[in-house]
Structure formats: structure tokens, C-alpha cells
Image: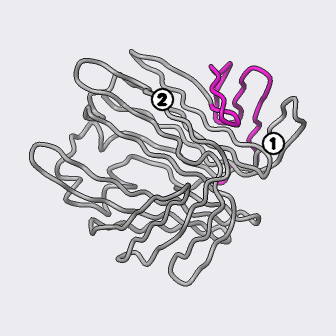
């Protein structure tokens, strides 16, 4: 889940459950950016999350974070990958959200996004070399995309609730039939190997994951976006990333 204010302050919340080989672990993390400063906090303590009537309410007590996401666009879901070992299910729960969030002493109000990813196959076994993902939200439009490249390839986007195969995807632009998104003034939120950026806050998890996953490289940005389509031009904020698997 995420939120970006009109001024560009942002928060990205992650909450996860791992059930594997008889173990059950929980993970929560929040990345915030305010006035150009990025901060990340992580916990293996439990979190509280509930959904009802298009609303998501979440609380990370240990991290002093809580917020509510109200759906403002229709959801979409898709099986991104499937083989005999398992599948990757992507649920774009809220392509556009109305968000109220408290992180420590800061309060954020703005437009946001929420999704749920379910994997029944270990991520280090996925036939993937590179993944580009992102979402654009404005008062008028929403766009989310997945670009998976490797032994298995798929690339699609969901624009205002309708799915399209992408024409092109890069760190700066996403094109689909009838629309294109341009990303500018990109501000780096995180860059480096997962073993150095994400896992240090969850040492128990780090001990379980193979080196190939810890060595996976990620770059994440917050950018200004302009979406041009038959509806005209729409301006909003983009959160997007590229991940390189080291297999």
C-alpha cells in the first residue's frame, strides 16, 4: 500500500506472511520520504489489517504506523505466472485510493494504491531475470503495470480498470494502445541489493533466504507522471521500480 501527497511526501507500506516448511513468519515495513529525506523501518512483529466495503485499515503498532485506504477505482486481478510448482497471483485491490495515514508524528493525506501478491512457489525459483512494476495515480486516471522478463515473459498494464498488453516499458515511459505515461523528476527511494536494503531489518528472514535472493538488486523511484490518452493529459505521481534477479 502507498500514499503520495500533493506536495510529494510519500509512504510505502509492506506487510507479508511467510508460510514455508512448517514456519510462519510475519513482516512489516514502512518507507517514508519527506522533504527529500528517506527513512525505512522494519519489524518482524505482527500487524493488523482488515478489509470491508472497499476500505482497508492497517496498523503496524511496533512501527507507529496506521492508516486507511478507501477504494476510488475498480479492482483487477490476474494470474501472472503458473506452472506445476505453483503460481503468482496479482490482485490490484485499489488502483486508486483515498488515503489517510499516520507515520510517527507525521500525517499524510493523498491519493494512493493497494495490491496483494500471493506466491505459492518460492520467488528464487521463478523464471525471471528482470521485473519492472509501477503505478500512476491522478484524480482522473489510474495505471498499473507489470513487465516480467526472463525464461518466461509477460507484460501488461491496467488502465482505468481495463487490461492491455504493453507496447513498451522503461524506467521513463510506459506505452499501451491509446495511452502513454511519461515519468520525470524521478527521486530515488531505494537502490541496492535486497540483502543490504530490505533484509537487515528482518534478520530472521535473512537467515532463511538463499544468497541468490539476497543478491537481487532493486531500484525504486517516486516520479512525477503525465498520462496522455484520448481523455487528454492527466498529471499525478508515480511509484515505480526495476528488480534484477541474480540467479
In-front residue for pair 191/58: 58
Give the residue displayed 23% in from the left and 40% down from the top: 211
Residue 41 percent across, percent down from the top left: 41, 68
> To which residue does mark 2 refer?
78
Number of callouts: 2
In-front residue for pair 105/95: 95
* On screen, residue 244 above or below 51: above
Q: Disc 2 on helix, strand or loop? A: strand
Give the residue displayed 62% in from the left and 19% down from the top: 165
Assign the magenta stretch its main secondary structure. strand
Residue 203 percent across, percent down from the top left: 23, 60
> To which residue does mark 1 refer?
226
In-front residue for pair 215/26: 26
On the rendered structure, is 231 left or right of 8?
Answer: right
Give the residue displayed 16% in from the left and 44% down from the top: 20
Q: Which corner quadrant of the image does residue 132 belong to?
A: top right
Residue 154 percent across, percent down from the top left: 50, 20
What segment is highlighted magenta in the picture? 158-187
Is label 1 or label 2 in front? 2
- Farthest residue to the left: give it: 22
- Farthest residue to the right: give it: 232
10 Å neighbourhood of mark 1: few (<14), some, or many (≥20)?
many
* On screen, residue 143 above or below 52: above
Amino acid at each position: 500500500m502507498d500514499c503520495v501527497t500533493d506536495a510529494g511526501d510519500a509512504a510505502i507500506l509492506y506487510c507479508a506472511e511467510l508460510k514455508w516448511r512448517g514456519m510462519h513468519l510475519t513482516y512489516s515495513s514502512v518507507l517514508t520520504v519527506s522533504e527529500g529525506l528517506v527513512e525505512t523501518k522494519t519489524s518482524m512483529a505482527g500487524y493488523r489489517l482488515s478489509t470491508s466495503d472497499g476500505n482497508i485499515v492497517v496498523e503496524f503498532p511496533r512501527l507507529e504506523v496506521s492508516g486507511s485506504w478507501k477504494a476510488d477505482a475498480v479492482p483487477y486481478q490476474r494470474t501472472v505466472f503458473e506452472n506445476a510448482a505453483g503460481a503468482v497471483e496479482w490482485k490490484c485491490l485499489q488502483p486508486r485510493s483515498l488515503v489517510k495515514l499516520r507515520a510517527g508524528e507525521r500525517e499524510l493525506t493523498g491519493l494512493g494504491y493497494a495490491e496483494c501478491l500471493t506466491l505459492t512457489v518460492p520467488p528464487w525459483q521463478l523464471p525471471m531475470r528482470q521485473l519492472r512494476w509501477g503505478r500512476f495515480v491522478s484524480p482522473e486516471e489510474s495505471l498499473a503495470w507489470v513487465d516480467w522478463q526472463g525464461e518466461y515473459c509477460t507484460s501488461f498494464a491496467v488502465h482505468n480498470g481495463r487490461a492491455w498488453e504493453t507496447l513498451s516499458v522503461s524506467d521513463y515511459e510506459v506505452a499501451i494502445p491509446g495511452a502513454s505515461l511519461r515519468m520525470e523528476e524521478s527521486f530515488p527511494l531505494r537502490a541496492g541489493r535486497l540483502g543490504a536494503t530490505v533484509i537487515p531489518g528482518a534478520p530472521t528472514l535473512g537467515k532463511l533466504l538463499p544468497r541468490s535472493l539476497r543478491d537481487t538488486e532493486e531500484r525504486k523511484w517516486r516520479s512525477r507522471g503525465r498520462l496522455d490518452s484520448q481523455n487528454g493529459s492527466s498529471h499525478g505521481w508515480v511509484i515505480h521500480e526495476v528488480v534484477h534477479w541474480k540467479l
